[in-house]
Amino acid sequence: MKPLFVTTLLTLTCLFSVKAQNIDSLKTAINAMAPDTNKVMALLQLSKEYLNIEPKDAIPFAAQARDLSSSLSFSKGAALAYKYIGIAYYQQSQYIEALENWRQSLSYYESLKDLTGIANIQSNIGAIYQNQGNESKALEYLFNSLRNAEQAGDEFRIASALINIGSVYQHKAATYDKAVQYYQRALPMSEKLEDNDQIGTIAGNIGEIFLERGRTDSALYYLKRAEKAFENTVDIASVLINIGRVYENIKNYSIALQYYQEANNAAVKLDSKLYETRAQKSLGAVYFATNNQKQALVAYHQAEKLANSISSSFELKDIYKGLANTYARQKSFEQAYKYQNLLLDIKDTIYNKELDIKLSNYEFNFEIEKKQSQIDLLEKDRVLKELDIRRQKFAKYAFMAGIGLVLIITVIIYRNYRNKVKVNILLDSQKAQIETLLLNILPGEVAKELQQEGHATPRFYEKVSVLFTDFKGFTTIADSLSPQQVVAELNDFFFAFDEITERHGIEKIKTIGDSYMCAGGIPVSSEDHPIRIVRAALEIQKCMIEKNRQRVAKGLDAWEMRIGVHVGPIVAGVVGKNKYAYDIWGTTVNIASRMESNGAPGQVNISESTYELVKHEFICTYRGKISAKNIGEIDMYFVSGTRDGSSLS
């Protein structure tokens, strides 16, 4: 279906209809105009023309309109100028700059009491927070947008806000009902406005929700409405693919094939490589399900070619999986092995892309917090300056009043001195708290170096043991629980893991979602860290068995976990400037992660290099090889217990 907040983006570019003009002629006309409000509007028209051609070139003209509006006290022109500058930055994915300009635009619209303009900008700001994964902040702005649109009586913006709110709720299965509720409120308004884009978006999104829930009749009803609304648009291919999915789910493969082929034809006609890729991928899946392996390979290979042309890693993941399964069914194991390896590589690529997105979101939130801090500091500085002026006036009046006020001044000075003493005591207390917090975040040696030198030097370690854990099916488990329950469950397990690793002298590195990562032999080198980390791994699995026994006794589902361990060289150091984090890097970390992902629930899976260091202490079972990117094949072993029969804590 269409991406979230599509109606917001339509609002951004389609609010003011400007007739197509020759840009050079428009520039010439502007140069001859007097510096008045008409020139402001002409500059904004020119900026809008560039928004549809090259967004970065729209900024200088909108900036001229902004400056001229400021000199003329033309608030409406300033509001539009900041809005267009924000649009240009948004289209270039420069969200911090877009947000700054839209907030300026919002302040002008608020001064004008222009409810339609306010609703528009609030919806745009909500789009930024939704893109950055901050759903609570997105909903805050979208509900304010809805409220102002309702007060203005603007049905188009009311419908847009309702659709966008539904899009946020559609992101999680637990809030599907809320999403449908807001979509169904928007649908009659969009039909009254005869806005096919809104109608298609609403119907298609509701259809997707019912499709995910397995309610095929309802899904077909809404998807058919979307098909009619999106006729002869690029989105028709997406709707046809979803209708095909409905028939594929109920195993009516012949009709599913018809819709996938129709979607492919529409995508080719409209030159949409993405939807053509998805249609071919879907055809391959149906051919595979009906044992038509020859046609499945043709479709999958065509999808592979298309996905590579648009560099779509997420589509390639499904395609490589389909090709591996199809070749395996044909007993062409060499080809199946080839695509299985490509599948593993693309999963690594997707993992890195998702990590980049998360880091980008963290950076966005950090920059927003930093800018807010700067605003707060400026406000405090203004207040302090005002206080300083008041003190000067007070001193002047005190001197004029004579010696009788000396006592009052002395009292004031003494009181200020007492306040400073209290502040110093408070600062000393806060310093002690910060030092304690730093020791909780970083290893003692690293924290000490950071305090003394102002930085921590990255270090290379020749031999470090790295352990990864991961819960099997965590996404499914998390979808069935509330956010509070998910955090409580993870805390229960991770607190227990912290106690085990601390007891064995293992350094906890970090948690990543439902994964837990720790390492032995850093920051202080030791010889027996491989043995200690394997003992810790066995104790963690023993802890999981006991906790699952308690959960089953309470009627709760058991959580299954994989553990992987590898020993090798790494680089360790502190990353970040304002928020420190001790982290490790290198091939060893990647191999440890692969040991975990290729392990089995309830088992400790170790690499060959780890096995050679601990085989005299533990009972290990050989379980085969795994292919690691840029490394080659690595032997793996399951650890089942200690050789001396000693019990674990």
Image (tube, rainbow, N blue to C red):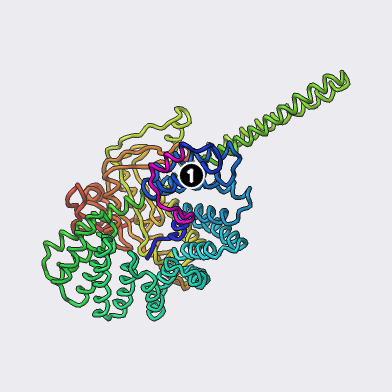
Q: Based on the displayed image, in which of its 4 quarters is residue 460 positioned?
A: top left
| Residue 456 or residue 540, whichever sits in front | 456
Check disc 1: other Cα within 10 Å, few if <14, some if 14-19, many if 20+.
Answer: some
Q: Quadrant of residue 284?
A: bottom left
Residue, disc 1: 42
Q: Residue at x 35, y 70 (%)?
A: 231
Q: Quadrant of the C terminus?
A: bottom left
* Residue 381 or residue 484, whichever sits in front: 381
Q: Position of residue 184 (x, y in %)?
A: 50, 72
In the image, the segment drawn in magenta is: 12-30
**Element type where label 1 sits in the image:** helix
121 left or right of 427?
left
**At which x and y percent is residue 390?**
75, 28
Magenta stretch encompasses residue 27: yes
Residue at 23% x, 64% y is 321
Residue 5 is left or right of residue 526, and the answer is right
Residues 562 and 195: in front is 195
Q: Is residue 518 left or right of residue 298?
A: right
Q: Is residue 250 above or below residue 438?
A: below
